[in-house]
Image (cartoon, rainbow, N blue to C red):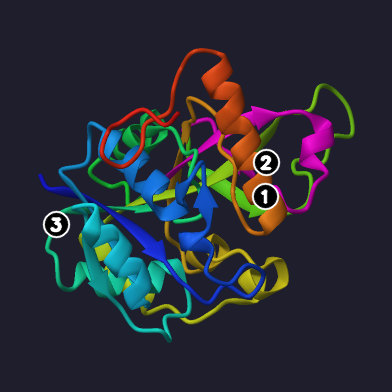
Amino acid sequence: MKVIGVIPARYASIRFPGKPLAPLAGRPMVLHVLAAARAARRLDSVLVATDDARIADVVRREGGEAVMTSPHAASGTDRLAEAAGRVPADVYVNVQGDEPLMPAENIDLAVETLLQGADREISTVALPIDENLARDPNVVKVVVAENGRALYFSRAPIPYVRSGEPAYRKHLGLYAYRAATLAKLAALPPSPLERAESLEQLRWLEAGWSVWVGQARADSIGVDTPEDLAKAEDELRRVQVRGTCPRDFRGEAIR
């Protein structure tokens, strides 16, 4: 079974134009994402799907693989599906291009969660969080059934806790799809719940697809703004202080 990691990297971000090329610890952010993906044991190869030659050039200069995709792709899933049409595989993993600190173990877990059942179509990962973080609408929450299937995703603090202890889970933007599923997801039109919460995965739930959730090994930091990039830089420094030096795309320690 061939498993490919695909990193969607769009240049024209509304809140942070040129985000994939923003410097993080002295290197373009997209190369940090590549480093994490290449460290994952369950990926046979990794490629960057981009709409901008500047991003592709940076990746290729470092020995990585990049494919050009349409600048009109409406979502990362659409960009992923376009790349999948050129590079055949059995499973594709959407490694978000704005998650430079995503642990490789989470990527492996997403693949392993998908492959636990032949009937599983999509998988992702989540981890427990406290109530304060759950109330942040920028943090996406997920409610999960006992068998591991996602019941709902929301920006609201779900589940609502009327009594007892809260059990909030933060959803990390990492997905694994079977090839046939990915092609069908890309053909789905936007749905009412997706528009209401601005969460693409709700489109899939509304259409009747199953999403399976694994227990993430560690958290990550999504970079949507320059302020988020500064937080990621601070976290990299903390990692270095703890003695676990992060690796760049070539596997060399970042000093």
> Counting other residues with Cα less than 10 Å from the Cα at mark 2, is it few (<14), some (14-19), or many (20 or more)?
some
Residue type for callout 3: Ala
Residues packed near mark 1 inside 10 Å, few (<14), some (14 to 19) or many (20 plus): some
Chain part drawn in magenta? 123-147
In-front residue for pair 177/17? 17
State the residue position of label 2: 231
Picture quarter with the N terminus: top left
Give the side of residue 133 with respect to residue 68, left or right. Answer: right
- Find residue 213 and report its horizontal and vertical position in percent: 47, 39
What is the x, y in percent for residue 6? 30, 57
- The answer to whether residue 138 is left or right of residue 21 is right
Rendered residue at 67%/45% (across/down): 230
Residue assigned mark 3: 89
Q: Say whether residue 132 is magenta.
A: yes
Three-letter code for the amino acid on which mark 2 is drawn? Lys
Q: Earlier in the sequence, mark 3 or mark 2?
A: 3
The numbered disc on residue 228 is 1
For the residue labelled by badge 2, is the local secondary structure a helix, a strand or a loop?
helix
Q: Residue at x 47, y 73 (%)?
A: 11
Q: Are marks 1 and 3 in contact (CB under 8 Å)?
A: no
List x then y, in percent, for residue 210: 43, 53
The C terminus lies in which quarter of the figure? top left
Quadrant of residue 58 in the image? bottom left
Circle 1 SS class: helix
Residue sitting nearer the eye, 136 or 209? 136
